[in-house]
Image (cartoon, rainbow, N blue to C red):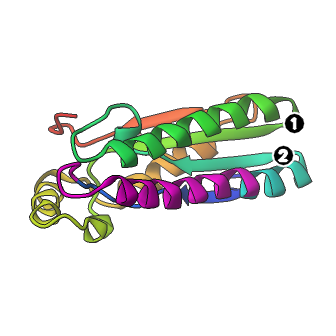
Amino acid sequence: MKPVDSPHSETGCTHLLSARVVGAQEWWCIGGRMIVVSKGIIRRSRNSVFATQSGQDINVSSVYGHIVVATGAVYCATKHAVRAISEGLRQEVKGYNIRVTTISPGAVQTELTSHITEPGLAEAVTEVVNDIGVPAGTMSRMVAFAIAQPDDVDVSEILFRPTVQQQ
């Protein structure tokens, strides 16, 4: 199994906020912080994989990088951005023996729900994740699957979620 050059690049935070609760300034502050993190993907990926001209870059998006939900517009936008940045990077580096994978998990039992700031929403999301979320080890298996492929196979994207998850 090859080493991962950019292991588990998590972009964005779990900011789920209702537009009726926050103003435009708060939206832009949150969005700006997430965009700065997204810019970090590009910088980090460029430095590690271009230096060796081989390797594997793994970026983490979310099921919400494929859909948009109320209270999650900015979060969903950053997760869509992770996918777009990753796909652009994949196209740029395909001639250098570099593979780029985006993994988009659904409900996974992690501490991410502790970052939700809207009253009541954190508790509701935590309850859902505790009820239907897959164990965190599922993410590790997805990473291992992408890495284990032969050199001539690039697993560009993995979208997974609990079988019972609606979205």
Overall secondary structure of the magenta section: helix
Residue 113, percent from left and from top: 26, 65
What residue range appears in magenta? Answer: 18-43
User: Residue at 45% of width from left, 61% of height from top?
Assistant: 29
Q: Is residue 132 above or below residue 112?
A: above
First along the sequence among labels 2 and 1? 2
**Mark 2 sits on what residue?**
54
The amino acid type, in three-letter code, at marker 1 is Tyr
Q: Is residue 27 one of those drawn in magenta?
A: yes
Q: Are marks 2 and 1 in contact (CB under 8 Å)?
A: yes
Q: Position of residue 75 (x, y in %)?
A: 38, 49
Q: Is residue 142 left or right of residue 87?
A: left
Where is 59 relative to 121, above or below? above
Neighbours of disc 2 within 10 Å: few (<14), some (14-19), many (20+): some
Name the disc covering residue 86, or none.
Answer: none
In the image: residue 120, left or right of residue 154? left
Tell me the tag on residue 96. 1
